[in-house]
Every structure is written in structure tokens, then in C-alpha cells.
């Protein structure tokens, strides 16, 4: 297969399906935000990652809807400057998937997805009680790549607080992957678990 993206008859949707079938597994963020009117919003993002350690910065990447509109998550974050990133594990995969439905802005996805909102320590959006790890974030900046359907934006959030349940902490102070059981997004409707893992030691320079 060879696709010259400047000279192809394939739609952006077709190209997108190909790309996400090999850019994987992608970690999933369950992002909690709140509207200026106080309506809670919850949405999953597999275009998500950590991008800076010092300062600690996470990114989530919403895309424009078919009618060129911004997703509720981005609208809320632009208005309030705050959001929460909850880690998605196998135990809440179904609820995460439910939250991807195109609910209207006035709908509380916590209620629709049977997840429990818990007050955060610093920001206004709620933590997800069922998630083992929640990160409170303050908006750093947003970069947009257009306003056509499918055009993405990168929302950078500075971590201001981390909530990790003690039972998931390993002896070295990090999270135990065996207990955490995060999942990743593949192409199509497929997901992957972290059950099959292997270690590689850091290489040393050969002199």
C-alpha cells in the first residue's frame, strides 16, 4: 500500500481508519469537565498522552464534529480552564464506551454511564470514583488544526493534583500494572489489555 496524501481519492475518514489501525495501542483518558452552568461532562479520548515531565503536562485531543462544531469537552475547558483525566481500566471499559455516545450538552454523562462523581481537591470538574487514578488539570494552552469536520485540537493541561488509590501502589511507589489493568485502543472497535507484558533493561553505552 502506498498513499500519496496530497493526491488521493480517499476521504479523510478512510485515511483516519488506516492510521489508527497502526498507531496503537493508544492509552485512553476519560476526561471530566464542567460547563459554566454546572453540567458535568464525561468523554473518552484515545488521542491522549503525557508530553512533559517538568512541568507535568498531559494532552487530550478532541476533533471537530461533522457539523464543524467543537466537542463539549473542549467547549467546557475553554470556558472554565479546568478538567480531570481519569485512567481507564478493564473494569470501567463498558462505562467508558457508553460515555462516547453523542449526548446533548445539557446531559450529565456521569448519570448516563452509571459512574460516580467525586469532588476534586483543586479544580471544579469531578473525579471518577471508579477509576484508580485521577489527575486534576489546569488548562495550559490549546492548539487547533482547523475547523473542518475531523480537524483536531490539542489541549495541554498542567497537572495540579494526582489521586491514586493506595491498593494500586507498588513497593517502588509507582502504580502496579498487574493491579491497574489499563486498556488501550486499537483500530476499528478493538481494545487491548496490558496482561501480556515484558521488561527490557535500559541499555548501557558500550565503550
Image (cartoon, rainbow, N blue to C red):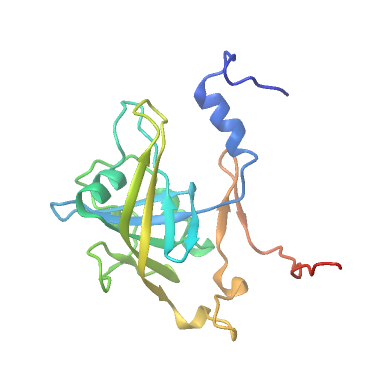
Image quarter in which the C terminus is found: bottom right
Image quarter in which the N terminus is found: top right
Q: Residue at x 42, y 65 (%)?
A: 55
Q: Position of residue 81 (x, y in %)?
A: 25, 55
Residue 165 in which image quadrant? bottom left
Q: Residue at x 39, y 37 (%)?
A: 63
Image position of 48 with respect to 63: above or below: below
Image position of 56 with respect to 142: above or below: below
Q: Position of residue 17 (x, y in %)?
A: 57, 32
* Number of dots carrying numbers: 0
Q: Position of residue 72 (x, y in %)?
A: 28, 43
Q: Residue at x 36, y 61 (%)?
A: 158
Q: Position of residue 86 (x, y in %)?
A: 41, 62
Q: Residue at x 66, y 21 (%)?
A: 3
Viewer-closest of 185 and 49: 49
Viewer-closest of 155 and 53: 53
Amino acid at each position: 500500500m502506498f498513499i500519496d496524501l496530497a493526491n488521493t481519492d480517499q476521504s479523510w475518514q478512510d485515511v483516519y481508519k488506516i492510521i489508527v489501525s497502526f498507531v496503537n495501542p493508544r492509552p485512553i483518558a476519560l476526561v471530566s469537565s464542567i460547563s459554566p452552568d454546572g453540567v458535568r461532562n464525561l468523554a473518552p479520548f484515545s488521542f491522549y498522552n503525557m508530553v512533559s515531565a517538568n512541568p507535568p503536562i498531559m494532552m487530550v485531543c478532541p476533533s471537530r464534529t461533522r457539523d464543524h462544531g467543537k466537542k463539549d469537552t473542549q467547549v467546557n475547558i475553554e470556558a472554565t480552564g479546568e478538567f480531570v483525566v481519569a485512567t481507564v481500566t478493564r473494569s470501567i471499559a463498558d462505562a467508558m464506551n457508553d460515555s462516547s455516545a453523542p449526548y446533548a450538552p445539557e446531559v450529565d454523562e456521569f448519570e448516563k454511564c452509571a459512574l460516580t462523581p467525586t469532588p476534586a481537591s483543586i479544580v471544579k470538574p469531578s473525579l471518577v470514583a471508579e477509576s484508580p487514578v485521577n489527575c486534576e488539570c489546569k488548562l495550559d494552552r490549546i492548539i487547533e488544526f482547523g475547523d473542518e469536520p475531523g480537524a483536531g485540537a490539542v489541549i495541554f493541561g498542567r497537572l495540579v493534583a494526582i489521586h491514586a488509590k493506595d491498593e494500586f501502589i507498588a513497593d517502588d511507589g509507582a502504580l502496579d500494572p498487574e493491579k491497574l489493568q489499563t486498556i488501550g485502543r486499537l483500530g476499528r472497535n478493538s481494545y487491548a489489555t496490558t496482561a501480556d507484558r515484558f521488561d527490557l533493561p535500559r541499555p548501557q553505552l558500550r565503550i
